[in-house]
Structure formats: structure tokens, C-alpha cells
Image: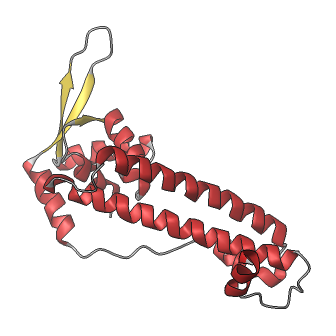
Amino acid sequence: MALGDAILACLTERPMTGYELAKTFDNSIGFFWKADHQQIYRELTKLRDRGHIQGREVVQSGKPNKLVYTLTPEGRAALRHWAARPSVPASIKDDLLVRLYALDSVDIEPLRTDLMARLEHHRDRFARYERLLSKRFPDGTAPPADVGKLLGLRVGLAHERAVAEWCEEAIEALSALSSGAERTNVVPIEDVKRETNS
């Protein structure tokens, strides 16, 4: 997926300024496709040059004029063409997982600290997804135009829950290692769970 495709998808909702697009990214698409404001503005220029969007200047009193972007028929066709292609599963590039792979050669405490920060990050995102779901879809259903948004929020919620639970397991396992167990002994996650539950 290219940033331009994500912008075209956003503009299917309504015409938006560059600022509104950036805010939409921050609060929706940004959960699974990151872009900063400068990238969005550069991409808007490219999309306009390709004829996929058009900008209309809106005169404002007391403020600078703003440029509102809308999809053109060519832009809608480009979005449909992109959406018809098969998706590519995301690959994971996570330096924390590489450090865990080399656990017998690295210090445990910095890893535990990193895992605790990750745990809080994923708990916060989980709570944010829950708030969005209860606000936008309080009864758990969506009109046909919003089913994709509901499904995206649900997979985000499930992902954040799973990663937070994994962080908890990893912290428990590293705590068992650093509390006196020999570093060469493997501490199975299941054993760590049984010990902490008893």
C-alpha cells in the first residue's frame, strides 16, 4: 500500500483539507498506516498532479484561505484498481524480538524495562480502541458504509490485547530468570504462569 492509496481511501468519506486529512490519519488510518503531516502534504501534491484529486480554494474571513481536496473520477478508479489487487501480509521487524532471541548474551534488566514500556503502550492503545468502539459503534453494529471501520477497530483491539498479554508473559519469564534461576536453564512460559497463580 502506498500513502497515496490511503489518502484516496480517506477522501471517500468527504472532502477534506490537508490538515483534516492529517488529523484523520492520526485518529483512524494512522493506527495501521503511519504518515506524518509533511508526507501527507507532499503526497497530496503528487495525487493532484496525477489527476486523482482536485483542490478547491475556500475563502475564509479573518483566516488564511484553505484548500479542500476531493476525489476525481480518475482517483476513484485508481482506488478501485488498487483495492482489487491482493494484499501483502505485513512483515515484522522488531528489534526487541531480536534481542530476546539473543537473551543468553544480553542483560535482562534493560529488556524487562523495555517490555514494561511496551506493555503500557499496548494497554493504552487497547483502551483507545475500546473508547472508539464504544463511541462510534455502541451496539457493536455498523451501517454498511462503516463495516470496514468497525472491522479495523476490532482487529486493532484484538491485536493490542494479544501483544499486551504476550508482554505480560515475557515480563514474567524474564523476572523468573533474573530472580536466581540460572541463565542457561529454559523457563517455560507455562511453568512461570503456574508459579505466579499459586
Give how far across and how far down residue 18 sits, in percent.
32, 36
In the displayed structure image, the side of residue 190 where residue 51 appears, left or right: left
Give how far across and how far down residue 103 sits, in percent.
77, 80
Give how far across and how far down residue 40 sits, in percent.
37, 44
As drawn, the residue found furthest toward the front would be 198
- Indicate the quadrant containing the C terminus: top left, top right, bottom left or bottom right: bottom right
Q: Is residue 122 visible?
A: yes
Q: How is the image coloured?
A: secondary structure
Count the labels in the image. Answer: 0
Quadrant position of residue 173: bottom right
* Image point (58%, 69%), residue name: 165
* Image point (43%, 52%), residue name: 130
Quadrant position of residue 176: bottom right
| Image: 189 above or below 107 | below
In the displayed structure image, the side of residue 111 where residue 159 appears, left or right: left
* Image point (27%, 19%), residue name: 65
- Indicate the quadrant containing the N terminus: top left, top right, bottom left or bottom right: bottom left
As drawn, the residue found furthest toward the top would be 62
Residue situated in front as seen by the camera: 126 or 64: 126
Q: Is residue 94 visible?
A: no
Give how far across and how far down residue 22 sits, in percent.
38, 40
